Amino acid sequence: MMKVYQIRELDPAHIDKLITLKGIVIRTSDTVPEMKEATFRCVQCLREESRFVERGRIAEPDHCEKCKKSRTFEIVHNYCQFTDKQHVKLQETPETVPEGETPQTIQL
């Protein structure tokens, strides 16, 4: 059984972990596409190579294994993989806020 955390209980140990939070959604953004895997093509020999996006960064290939040339890759957007992304703002439930304090919020 998974523990349900309060917003005030969060700490750096929870980064990159799946946890359950209790709160009230107070704001959401529009859903936008986010790249998960990028595909590159060498403009010299047309060799394709895919790279995963990690923490918002793409490790673009710097040399081609086939033609041995450097900096010849360009991104091929139609072959990239995307998922939907949405920002959610979550606020503590009123019964968990200590008396006299302002409710804490977190962006997800």
Image (cartoon, rainbow, N blue to C red):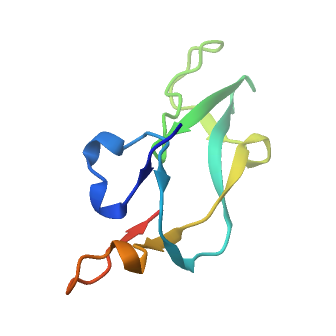
Q: Residue furthest left?
A: 100
Looking at this view, name the residue that lies furthest to the right: 78
Residue in view at x 22 percent, y 83 percent = 99
Give the left or right position of residue 37, taking residue 61 as reference.
Answer: right
Using the image as rendered, state which of residue 89 and residue 62 is in the foreground: 89
Q: Residue at x 48, y 34 (%)?
A: 59
Figure quadrant of residue 100: bottom left
Give above or below for 96 relative to 101: above
Image-quadrant location for residue 75 = top right
Q: Residue at x 50, y 40 (%)?
A: 2
Who's the residue at 35% across and 71% down the image?
A: 96
Observer-nearest of 17 and 87: 17
Residue 80 drawn at (x, y percent): 72, 42
Residue 72 image position (x, y, % from top left): 59, 32
Residue 12 is situated, as x and y percent measured from the top left of the image, at 27, 46
Vertical order, 62 against 25 (above or below): above
